[in-house]
Every structure is written in structure tokens, then in C-alpha cells.
Image (cartoon, rainbow, N blue to C red):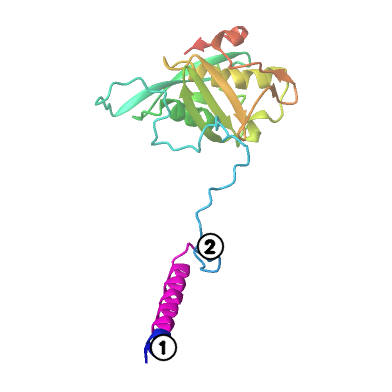
């Protein structure tokens, strides 16, 4: 009987040890299950390219502030007067005043009026007024920053004409934009690309153009 009890006790002890060992093995850290389907957040790959600095004027929004107005906040006149520069008697840029609805985007408004050409009444003045800017030229954008007006025009602006014609059309834009106290110089773009060599005449534009760069075409004020 004593021996039987001893055998039973030994079996119970072995069973207890086995149970403890099994429990310990189940609590060990297990490797992560790669088949769980949980997606890890991976940062986007760095291609090494810096964001480009978009210096091209934006698409024209006549109601947006293009940076050219120096009006104090809260002052909203009904109209503003801009001076447009044409070609007079085939040799001199001529400044003619035109009244347009008030806007803070005065440079954009002035360029829009300039590209629309002289009115029928203006064409009958003396000396005769014409424009060297090719028909169909579109304003793609204009912004003013740190005294420089960046004006973006369609490809028609650089097409055709001899030296006088292409120089005059540049002068028309420069005179028209530098009338504003916020603009000291004009940087030209064609279809979003800054111009270094202008038109088939090969005029070198080595930086923003200033009023004095066209002193041979000094305007005759009407």
C-alpha cells in the first residue's frame, strides 16, 4: 500500500512539472506574425529633388491683388485712371489716360487695357496713335514683388516686326507698368518662360527692364 501511494505521488509530481514547463513555453515572446495583413506606415521615398520655386506669374484673375496697388486698406474709389503708352507718329511712345473700374490689381488692369489696343476715338487724335504690340497677344499673368513686375505674355507678343517694332512694344509695357510707384522694373515672360533673348531680332534682356533702358523712346504725354 505504501509503495502504491509512492508511485501515485511520483506520477502526480511529474505531471505537475510537465504542466509548469508547458505553461512557461507558451508565455515566451513569439516572433511577429508576418501574415496578419496589418500594413505598416512607410514614409514616402525621398527622390532628392527640392520643390521648384515657381516664379512664373499665375493665371490672370482680374479680381485678385497682383501686388501693384499702394492704396490704403479701406479706400475704395469707384474708378481709377491709368496711363497707357502707345506709339505716336511712328517714333515715340505716347501716354494716354484711360479710366477703368477700381481694382487693387492696377497693373493687371493697365495691361489688359494696353493689349486691347487704342480705341476708335484715340486713333483719331493727333499725332496719330498706334500700337507695336501684335494683335492677339494675351496676358497670361502679372505679379509685382519687391519693385519688379513679372509679366507673362503669349507667344504673339514676340512675333514679327523689325528692331523698332520689337523695341517699341517692350517700351510700351515698361512705360505702362513703371507708372505705378510699386514698380521699378519689368521682367518679361513668354508662355511662362523668362525671356533672355527677345524675338527674332535677338534683343538681349539681361535682367528686369527699366524706364531708362528705353530713353530713346521717351514718351510724349498727351
Q: Main secondary structure of the magenta part?
A: helix
Mark closer to the observer (1, 2): 1
Identify the secondary structure beneath mark 2: loop
Rendering quarter of residue 72: top left
How far is the residue under mark 1 from the one under mark 2? 47 Å
Q: In this figure, what is the number of numbered marks?
A: 2
Residue at the spot of label 2: 31
Determine if the magenta segment contains residue 13: yes
Pick whichever of labels 1 and 2 is earlier in the sequence: 1
Q: Specify start and end residues of the magenta stretch as a single range.
A: 9-29
Q: Which residue matches tag 1?
A: 3
Residue 13 placement: quadrant: bottom left
Secondary structure category for the residue under label 1: helix
Q: Is residue 169 left or right of residue 5?
A: right
Tell me the residue at 43%/83% (across/down): 11
Of the pair 109 and 18, the residue shown nearer to us? 18
Please tell me in which quadrant of the rendered image residue 99 appears.
top left
The furthest residue to the bottom? 1
Residue 122 sits inside the magenta stretch: no
Q: Is residue 125 visible?
A: no
Is residue 204 left or right of 29 when viewed as pictured?
Answer: right
Who's the residue at 42% across and 36% down the image? 62
- From the top left corner, tell me how far across and down residue 65 is, in percent: 39, 31
Image x and y of residue 179, in percent: 45, 15
- The crowding category of the residue bearing disc 1, from other C-alpha atoms within 10 Å (few below 14, some 14 to 19, many at least 20), is few
Amino acid at each position: 500500500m505504501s509503495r502504491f501511494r509512492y508511485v501515485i505521488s511520483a506520477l502526480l509530481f511529474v505531471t505537475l512539472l510537465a504542466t509548469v514547463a508547458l505553461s512557461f513555453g507558451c508565455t515566451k515572446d513569439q516572433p511577429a506574425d508576418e501574415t496578419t495583413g496589418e500594413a505598416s506606415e512607410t514614409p514616402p521615398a525621398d527622390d532628392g529633388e527640392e520643390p521648384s520655386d515657381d516664379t512664373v506669374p499665375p493665371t490672370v484673375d482680374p479680381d485678385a491683388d497682383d501686388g501693384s496697388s499702394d492704396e490704403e486698406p479701406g479706400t475704395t474709389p469707384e474708378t481709377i485712371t491709368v496711363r497707357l503708352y502707345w506709339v505716336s507718329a511712328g517714333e515715340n511712345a505716347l501716354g494716354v489716360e484711360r479710366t477703368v473700374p477700381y481694382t487693387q490689381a492696377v497693373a493687371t488692369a493697365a495691361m489688359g487695357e494696353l493689349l486691347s489696343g487704342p480705341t476708335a476715338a484715340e486713333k483719331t487724335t493727333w499725332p496719330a496713335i498706334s500700337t507695336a504690340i501684335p494683335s492677339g497677344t494675351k496676358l497670361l499673368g502679372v505679379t509685382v514683388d519687391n519693385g519688379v513686375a513679372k509679366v507673362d505674355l503669349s507667344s504673339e507678343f514676340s512675333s514679327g516686326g523689325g528692331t523698332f517694332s520689337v523695341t517699341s512694344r517692350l517700351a510700351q509695357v515698361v512705360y505702362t507698368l513703371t507708372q505705378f510707384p510699386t514698380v521699378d522694373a519689368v521682367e518679361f515672360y513668354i508662355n511662362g518662360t523668362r525671356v533672355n533673348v527677345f524675338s527674332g531680332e535677338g534683343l538681349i534682356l539681361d535682367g528686369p527692364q527699366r524706364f531708362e533702358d528705353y530713353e530713346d523712346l521717351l514718351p510724349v504725354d498727351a
